[in-house]
Amino acid sequence: MSAEESGGEFSAAWLSLREPADASARALELVEQLPGTVRTVRDLGCGTGSLGRWLSPRLGAGQHWIMTDRDPALLLHAAESMPDGVTVSTQRLDVTDLTAADLADTDLVTCSALLDLLTAEEVERLAGVCAEARVSVLFTLSVTGEVQLAPHDPLDAEFEAGFNAHQRRVMDGRRLLGPDAPRVAEEAFTRAGATVTVRPSPWRLGPAMPALTAEWLRGWVGAAAEERPDLPAGDYLERRLAALPHASVGHKDVLAIFN
């Protein structure tokens, strides 16, 4: 998930808050392009399992989902909340440790709001692993860094730039992709031999979703201010929260198929 959307936290409460917006944003047409029958799905960085709850009803019968995450509490939540008729197993694993052997008999690898937290080298490796296993991938809701707010504020662009710089920060010696993730993933999987399709999947926020919009604003502004302490974050956030704007928060979905 994206740091701007969570304030850096992967809590079940935040993941539940954002789930309706995620469901509305994902590019359904990419699901319709999945080849063949999907029986076994590996969900990377599964969180509470929200992607599984959205995607599994759109696939055929007899599905088995392998929920993969580093957080055992989130894995338990995900396993217990999938729809009836879907079998689930869990594995505590970092996406960077995934191997082609892990993907034996897997029909689809998927994730939601994860790629921006990886490096270019890690995405390149992931593409190679999926190519070796010849498994299709559907990566949803990778942040693009593009934010449109209405009404406009003269400082919107400054906070957007600050946030995007924060997303590309070096963390523990790793240069995160942030909003470059969709492009890097498209290029990496294309080089690996996949046919790649990319579609926009923006969040649509605003006064009709006050809790989520306010929480997203706090995280977005907070990340920008961490990168740019000179920004008047307190004043800007106060007036934005006082009259919640309509917001389009850019994301993209990526489908890669190995023929």
Image: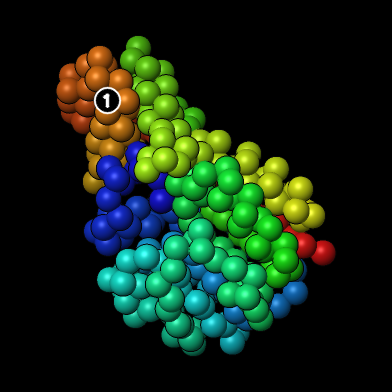
The residue pinned by badge 1 equals 225
- Residue 23 drawn at (x, y percent): 46, 57
Residue sitting at the far front: 173
Left or right: 231 with respect to 158?
left
Observer able to see residue 73: yes
Colouring scheme applied when the structure was drawn: rainbow
Q: Which residue lies at the image location 27% right of the left edge and 25% below the top edge?
A: 225
Q: Identity of the amino acid at label 1?
A: Ala
Q: Which one is in front, 14 or 44?
A: 44
Q: Which one is in front, 21 or 111?
A: 111
55 above or below 253? below
Q: Which residue lies at the image location 65% right of the left edge and 63% below the top edge?
A: 129
- Residue 194 drawn at (x, y percent): 76, 55
Left or right: 215 with respect to 145?
left
Q: Where is residue 10, by image quadrant? A: bottom left
- Residue 30 drawn at (x, y percent): 66, 57
Left or right: 170 with respect to 259?
left
Q: Which residue lies at the image location 79% right of the left edge and 55% below the top edge?
A: 193
- Residue 154 drawn at (x, y percent): 35, 12
Q: Quadrant of the C terminus?
A: bottom right
Residue sitting at the far right: 259
